[in-house]
Image: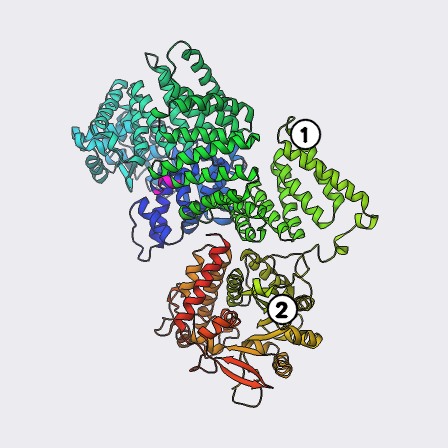
Amino acid sequence: LRQIVSGAMIMCAAQVHPAGDDVGNEIAAANFLVDQNIFNKTDRVNIGSIVPTVADAQLLSLLSGLNPKARTRSIVDSLMKILKLLQPLMIILEGDGDIDPSSWSLLAELMQRARVECPQIMLIVSSRDSPTITSAASNLRRNAVQVKLTPFEKYETEEYLRVLLKVKERKTTIDQRLLDVVHDRANGCPLFIECVARWALAKNMIEFVEGTKKVNLKLLDERSDDVTAAIPRELSNILLAPFNKLSPPLWDVLKIASCIGYSFDADLYSTLNKVLEFMPKIRELSAKYDCFEQTGSHFRWKQQAVYEAVKSLLMVNQRQKIHRMIVRAFEQSKINHIDDIKGGDVRRLLGRHCALAEDWAGACEQYMRAGDRAKAMYNFNEASKMYEEAIDFQAKMSEQPSLRSRMIPTINLGTCLRELARYKEAEAVLTRCLNEAKGEFSEIALDEELYVRALTALAALYQAQSKYDAARRLFERAVPIARNIQESRSSLWLAENIAGYAETLRKSGDLPQAERHHREALEIRTRAVEEKSCTDLELAVSYTQLGCTLAGMRQYKEAYEQHHNALGLRYRYLDFSHGLVSESLNYCAESLCALGRGGEGIPLALHAVEIRRLIFGTSHPAYAHALSVLASCYHAVGRYFDACDCLEKCLEICEVAFQKNHANIIPNLMNYGNVLRSTGDLTKARIVYQRAITIHELNFKGGQQARQLEKCKAEVDDLTDKIEELDASVKSCHSDDIPDEIFRKHVIPADVESQGTPLIVYTDIGRDVDDELALVLLSALKRKHILNPVAVITTLSPQRERAHLARGSMDAMGMPDVPVGIGSCGGVAEGVDLEIYGSDYSRSSPCIFESGLDLVRRTLESVPPKSAVVLCIASLSDVAICIREHEELFRSKVKEVVLMGGVLSTELGESLIPDSAYNNNCDISSARFVYKRCQELGIPTATLSRWAAYGCPIPPKLLDEIAKTEHMVATNIRSVSKLSIDQLWNKVILHPDDPRREKLPNRCDISWFCRTFMSKGIISKEWTSSVWTLVKKLNMYDPLAVLLCVPAYRAAHFDWKSKIVNGVPHIVVGTSERDTGIINRLSLYNEYSSLFLFAFQESLHK
């Protein structure tokens, strides 16, 4: 499998490479695939579990403790990225041995996923015996086509001979004696039939007799009547005939190669070059005699029959002698200096040669070292096999090894089995090991370090199985001994033991003791990082464990600090989409929620949900937990029914994922009951708490998790009292009867002094990305308390879907408390829905106001007089409706209306008149009404035209830069922008009459595209790649309109023309191509680009 994955990476890199060049080895291929964004850091970890050379130890450490099924899915995620680029593709696994269970699981997952993601792939498993497909690969058992190759019947041998001998006429026959001898010698094997026929033809033994129309065997020996005697009965004589003239050194190399095996890695056997010039002679045999075929550094016999024939020439003692010679060559080459990662392969192969030489002690030592290397690379499946081999060879040794020698591979085997979730096997191995140690330690001096290892290995297993009492007893015996021998072991080893004990204490409910021990372990690991004996990612684990302990003790402020420390390290070393990043995001969100900062936690929780959806799918407990955290955050900001939706999905997953009445469901039930109480559904809340009590009593003994039980019982009692006090109408309250306050649809009065200027926004978000960028900018200004968005209204059909996008985007940007309302169709004809781009975070929500007009009315009523700014970056239909229906309220509360659009020249007439800009043109009558009425009512207006946007275009590199924050909104904006520009280019290059141009004007040709988006230069019409990298400027209108709402930014960056109407100034920024109204485009660009990055980084707590 390693060879297949390595080859696939190299092939994929060569295919993607612009020049189609060979990228060399697997490391160079992996680096290239990362540079091309085909792979990410997580992929390097996954692929590194198969091809260890491509990942470093910092990343590989993440594989420890990973659920085997989740790990398999993650590996296949990475494999699919390269395999789907190579299809159509055939993958062949061939050999004589059984495939191990984890590899079967990987193949099963690969083929199941391939149906959808990589349909042009065929997987062939070739083996002499029918392969045993494990239960873990049940879908392969059901769906694989099993083909059994059986020997040819005689008539099939005849047909194949006709093909080989080019006998086309049916009248011509094969002589019976020729057919009999070929079928007899070949045993019905097509390859052997070909060998016999080729050998006989080379000896000129086959002839065509014209008179009889037969193909016969010639009688070469006149003294014998038996023509078949001329063909050797031993097939090896035929197969090896081409090698009869080989020199003795080449014959020696051929025999050594047969002892090594059917295939081998030239790099691993390069040590034989000094003694035998092994690889040069292998290459000579390949070139002159066609013995081997080569793929990279990998060689294999061209014909298995020749390999078997050469192998059959050697007696047992000859083979043992060759294996001993190979072992000596390795030992003389100073194996300790071999590269660390390939060292594992060398040790494994050297162990095999020792075993075949019957050097059992040497084999045991080499397999132990191979196991240690595999374990260090977190390849626990390989490591477990190596340790099992080492234990087997110990049993064959003439002298019994010492207790320490016997215990070390056994303890290591048990640890690997635990990591592979093979708990029963691990428990049997470790319990037997500990019992044996007890018996012998009583008679001889105690090996304390080894005794601690045995105790903690079994304790860690019990902890993994939730057997906390048993684990605690073992740790309590191990940790004091470990402290006593600290001086003779690294402090990191002590920290691991203390941290393991602390986790057992935490999970069993003894939080004060857990805190004390976790702090001690953290202190030791911090020193170890400074000494470079511990990775930062291991330190992140300590931060996380201490954070969880503190949260359990309700010390939420420090809990958040510890989780944020872990998040910072994981941000630094891991891909944003890594499961451990989602873990830290979840814990930070939980802590923020407990601190009363649930609004800050929502962006973190949303990203955790999305990461876990991608990694685990929507039926995994990890995804359910992320939903539960998100629900807590929504609950904290008063979004009760959003919280209910999340928890109902969470519980639905848990009921399937866990066994009935599992203890893990209790926290989610308590969370759900709390939210139901907030919605007013007290009866259902009580039922939920009662079920939590029942499950607790089924899982815990008296005194265990007592606080949890007390909380549930207190809630049931309190709810019972409340229900008895309420009338029947409240008991039967349905969501249709629940007041807006329950849906968090009440409007909070604006505090201008502390929160900034109240802002009402009208947007057609989803039409192009600048509306969403405007909301991003708004989130930054809200965090700085400069602007306070009090309502966002979506307009332009389909306005409901736009509200969903706005709600999701604002939640992800940390504005979950800003209400969203659904506006009008924006002047679009009834039944016509305009384009809206997609996003994974767009979400329906009960807290969205069905009437945007009602939301604006209530918002205006809540703000001080002449304090609100109305920002319209869409059709003016809804602003016009608001003025018509609530004119006096609008006049008294609005201090300015800021509009993205345009007006006719300020020098024409006595008032401003809207021009044909897109926003105006959506509903021109409403646009004229808004401008006219604002001027009549004395409400100042500020208009930003398209010329201003042209005066300060943004480079695409800014969108690339914000996408690097990996915030879901940033990556979607960049993706949508790139897709839009590529789609526009593909329309531009079409003929003006091509209907695929849709409504694109004829003036929009290649020259126009280059002028608009590139400033200069020209692109060939034949350009087939994405034009994104060639684009130099994009026009973003709406973010500039947001900045125009802030007096300080307005004065610093904009120049405008004023029109005084009824004594009130109305300003216009950008009146022509020359007068863009931008004072300094670089200064303005620096201003808003820093605000964009600030918004994304702050929402993710980076």
The residue at 53%/75% (across/down) is 999
Q: Is residue 378 visible?
A: no
Q: Position of residue 415 (x, y in %)?
A: 44, 27
Closer to the N terminus: mark 2 or mark 1? 1
Magenta stretch: dominant secondary structure: helix
In space, the residues marked 2 and 1 are separated at their CA atoms by: 54 Å
Residue pointed to by mark 1: 697
Q: Can residue 275 be seen in this view?
A: yes
Residue 188 sits in which quadrant? top left
Q: Residue furthest front?
A: 753
Q: Position of residue 446 (x, y in %)?
A: 39, 15
Residue pointed to by mark 2: 797
In this picture, residue 57 sits left or right of residue 1076: left
Q: What stretch is highlighted in magenta?
A: 54-59
Q: Where is residue 56 in the image (x, y as percent from the top left)?
A: 35, 41
Q: Position of residue 1028 (x, y in %)?
A: 41, 65
Of residues 973 and 256, the one nearer the viewer is 973
Q: Relative to 73, does residue 444 appear above or below in the rendering? A: above
The residue at 69%/43% (across/down) is 673
